Image (spheres, rainbow, N blue to C red):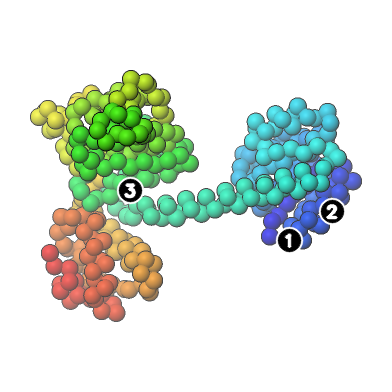
Amino acid sequence: MPKILIIEDEAAIRRVLVKILSEENESYQVEEAEDGLVGIGKIKNDDYDLVLCDIKMPKMDGVEVLEATKKIKPEIPMVMISGHGDLDTAVNTMRLGAFDYISKPPDLNRLLNTVRNALDKKELVVENKLLKKKVSKNFEMIGESDAISHIKDIIEKVAQTDARVLITGPNGTGKELVAHWLHQKSERANGPMIEVNCAAIPSELIESELFGHVKGAFTSAVKDRAGKFEAANSGTIFLDEIGDMSLPAQAKVLRALQESRIQRVGSDKDIKVNVRVVAATNKDLKKEIAEGRFREDLYHRLAVILIQVPALNDRRDDIPLLVNHFTEKIAGEQGTSKKAFSDKAIKLLQDYDWTGNIRELRNVVERLIILGGTEVSEQDVKMFASK
């Protein structure tokens, strides 16, 4: 049921607005506030889907109410009510974040259309927040070990900046989770997160994949195509397995980082991009530099912040938490009830040599859920979790 607050010092105008909205939709729950101070008090203490606010009021005018609301509950759409002489101010409130404005006396159709559109926007904002929570759940970092706690602390400090981050660690340790957390906790969270697996793209196609190409640049280039850097504009690009990137492509990436500009393959036209770069590798890049396979200048551009993700064998205390997380996730995916693991089964899993890290643990947990008993036992682990 949509909840609407009307902040207006003229009682007659309030009554008209309440009448119009109540007759339009009986499900609208309409409340009133006779001035800005009372209105802000209500906004602080209650949840509203829309606020209609007069501009000229005693004690606290509409512009001040708008600015205060955007600080405490920025998701609430604000529609400003303007007298004839307030029109310039009403237009300025749009720059401050107002959804729209209506003039006195209110035109019935304009008022109702504005209210419907504003409520639709609020619903979309709520849906997006729920979706973000679901996405965050998919990339949740599970663990309370010192190593994982340290990584989480770094992310909290670094995420709000645009500092480039290089994530290192063995395969299967969850480097991509770190990259997603960095993005989702950043100011760029509303922008795209574009992932590129540099090891999976043939060296002759990597430049086209990253920077795009123009029609005729090579045999199969039948039309212009934007690359991943353009797709990630205003967001984050995650260059996974960057240690496998060819030297020519590395040179192009270096230029993109230095100048925030790219060129599509086959073109000499510069395209400005605003992208945060997060990279990851399972290789020792200093060794790669010494052997001439990786550019040292690119390494120093990427490694402003270094995050080392530990192997699972180095964080065995987190295995009970990870097993619990995977059993819940797998049960949700398969539509079954969650299966318990005995203490002895968990202890045996903690003693295993996890060469495949978290990725391997997840596969083993799924196998045990499918093949094990009602409660996964120590014997199940010995029988089905063997290498």
Q: Position of residue 268 (x, y in %)?
A: 33, 20
Residue kind at label 3, given as amino acid type:
Leu
The quadrant where residue 238 appears: top left
User: Which picture quadrant has residue 28?
Assistant: bottom right
Residue 387 can be seen in this image: yes
Mark number for residue 177?
A: 3
Above/below status of 166 relative to 353: above
Pointer 3 or 1: first along the chain? 1
**CB under 8 Å between callouts 3 and 1?**
no
Residue beneath disc 1: 27
Q: CA distance from mark 2 to mark 3?
A: 52 Å
Residue mark closest to the camera, 2 vs 3? 2
Element on which disc 3 rests: helix
Helix, strand or loop at label 2? It is helix
Residue lying at 84% horizontally and 53% vertically, measured from the top left: 19
Which kind of residue does numbered mark 2 sit on?
A: Lys
**Residue occupying image coordinates x 69% and y 56%:** 2
* Residue type indicated by callout 1: Ser
Question: Visible in this render: residue 182?
Answer: no
* Left or right, residue 42 beside residue 316: right
Q: Which tag is nearer the camera, tag 3 or tag 1?
A: 1
On screen, residue 313 versus residue 215, left or right, reads left
Residue 61 appears in which quarter of the rendering? top right
In the rendered view, would you say 257 is above or below 366?
A: above
Relative to 132, residue 80 above or below: above
Circle nearer the N terminus (2, 1): 2
Mark 3 → mark 1, Cα distance in angstroms: 43 Å
Q: Secondary structure at mark 1?
A: loop
54 with respect to 354 (left or right):
right
Provide the residue designation for mark 2.
19
Sequence-wise, the earlier of marks 2 and 3 is 2
